Every structure is written in structure tokens, then in C-alpha cells.
Image (cartoon, helix red, strand yellow):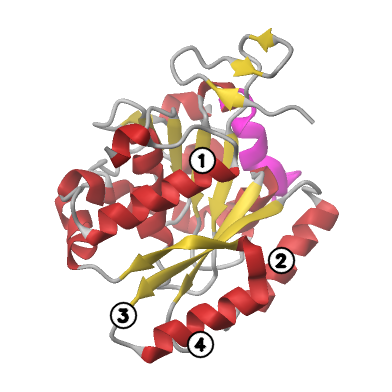
Amino acid sequence: MHSYAIRRRDRTLVNHHSTVKNFFMAKIIVIANQKGGVGKTTTAINLSATVAAAEFKTLLIDIDPQSNSTSGLGIERNSLSVYQVLIGLEPAENCIVNSYMPYLDILPSNIDLVGAEVEMVSIENREYLLKNALQHIRSDYDFIFIDCPPSLGLLTLNALTSADSVLIPVQCEYFALEGLGQLLNTINVVKKNFNEPLSIEGVLLTMFDTRLRLSNQVVEEVKKYFGSKVFQTIIHRNVRLSEAPSHSKPVILYDASSVGAQNYISLASELLQRNNLQKMEKIVE
């Protein structure tokens, strides 16, 4: 089996025996959990920003009608959004917005997305709308992250059908595993019917509070259930991490020395290593 690496500058796919230009397709990672308040959007914003800071070309797709990833990166909710892409009014490239970070773009959400699922029901092959829309832009990026709504409706189904893998945030609090069975069942249904290669990228423990014995108990329980799929990095509760969205910044730009920023730098490094990509020397230094 060949080992691959991405050269950040020329986007060349390299293996031990040959070099093939313009062959690489972005890895699409969905951040999903139908349970609300587990850190999906916080992870979507900060993981995508931290990967982009390491000079991997990154696209964040906000497919949540609440549009928190959009506002959290300081993007105005304008008329063009992922809604127009899903219902076929605009190609994705017309709706993608450049962020203030050189390697980070966003496909924003807006209030129109609230009614999208109703409109999508009558569209043929409705489960594949997002997948089809992303096909011709995948080669423009190294990673595409999708921030899902806290539900298992058609929007999340479209995200799972288009993805290579799923990152599942789990809050370190009571009832942490509640509803995970339903999510895993949905992933299995998607694998069986729409997207066989779909895998679990990893389970991320969030909102860890060192003062609470319960947090440690949840960590043990999740690791017992998911084993090696659990990221070693744990996201701690952190004031600076909570403040950053109100300043429309990812935490690495708001306060790079904070615990929250260091957690997401560690997570991004772990994600890149899991995918046999370079470590994040630039950020870590």
C-alpha cells in the first residue's frame, strides 16, 4: 500500500514511485451529532481554521439553518448561500466566500435554508444534491468540513451522502451517549443505501471540565464504547473559546495561547497525522 502526502504549495499527489499532478480530491469530513449543544459548530469553525492555518486549502460548508459557522467567521448572511446550491439555482463556486484567512473559504448558510428540506423532498435523487454540487470543486481543496444541523433530516443526510467520513463531537456531561445509537444507525443506513465508503473519522470529547469527576467518567465510557476511534485530544471548557465567536474569529486568531486554541491545534495535528499528512510545525511553533 502506498503512503501519500500532500505538498501544500503545488497540490501535487506524491507516492513512492511516481508524481501525478492535479489528482488529489479533498477529503470531506462531516461534523455531526443530532444532539444540540455538543460543540459541533465550535469544532467546525476552529478545526477548519486551524487546518487552514497550516496552509491546507480548506472549505467550510455551513449546512445548519442557524448559520452560526457563517457568523462565527464574520461572514455576512447574504442572498447567496448553500441553499441556492442545494436546490440547483447556483453552482457552488458562485456562492463560496473567501474568509480573511488565506487558505480558508466558506460556503455560507442563511435563513432560506430553514425551508430547504421541504423543497428538497420533491427533487429527484434528493439525497445526492450536495454530493453532486461538490464534485467539480473537490479538486480545489485539501479538506472540506461540513457543519450539520442538530437533526437527522435531509440536510444531514445530504452531508453524510457526500462525505468520506464523520467526526462526532460528544459532550463530557451526563447523557453524553444519549442519541448516539440513532446517529450510528443513520450512518449505517447511509453506508448501505447511499455511500458505502463512509467511515467514522473519530469521536471528539468536548466541554471537558477538569473540576468534575463526571467528565472523567464520560471519557472512560466513550473510550470503552468507541476504542481507538476516540481522538486523544480532548476539548476543555475555556472562556476564550466561548468568547471568540462574538468577535467573529476562530480561537487561534482571538487568543492563540489559550487552552481552547491549543486544544484545536492538537486536534488538527492529530487529524492530519491520522490522514498521513504533515504535522503542524508552523502552528505548534
Judging by the rendered image, the residue that carries numbered circle 1 is 272
Describe the element under mark 2 as helix, strand or loop.
Answer: helix
Disc 2 residue crowd, few under 14, some 14–19, many 20+, Cα 10 Å: some
**Amino acid at the residue labelled 2:** Thr
Side of 171 where 195 appears, left or right: right
The mark that comes first in sequence, 1 or 3, is: 3
Judging by the rendered image, the residue that carries numbered circle 2 is 186
Q: Residue at x 29, y 32 (%)?
A: 99
* Label 2, label 4: how far apart the Cα atoms are: 19 Å
Q: Position of residue 213 (x, y in %)?
A: 38, 90
Judging by the rendered image, the residue that carries numbered circle 4 is 175
Residues in magenta, as a range: 121-137
The mark that comes first in sequence, 2 or 4, is: 4
Q: Residue at x 36, y 73 (%)?
A: 207
> Can residue 244 be seen by looking at this rendering?
yes
Q: Nearer the viewer, residue 239 or 109?
A: 239
Side of 214 where 236 appears, left or right: left
The mark that comes first in sequence, 4 or 1, is: 4
Marks 2 and 4 close (CB-CB < 8 Å): no
Describe the element under mark 4 as helix, strand or loop.
Answer: loop
Disc 1 residue crowd, few under 14, some 14–19, many 20+, Cα 10 Å: some
Q: Position of residue 187 (x, y in %)?
A: 71, 61
Magenta region includes residue 134:
yes
Question: Which corner quadrant holds the C terminus?
Answer: top left
* Label 2, label 1: how far apart the Cα atoms are: 26 Å
Q: Residue at x 44, y 24 (%)?
A: 94
> Can residue 118 be seen by looking at this rendering?
no
The mark that comes first in sequence, 3 or 4, is: 4
Residue found at the very far right of the displayed protein: 192
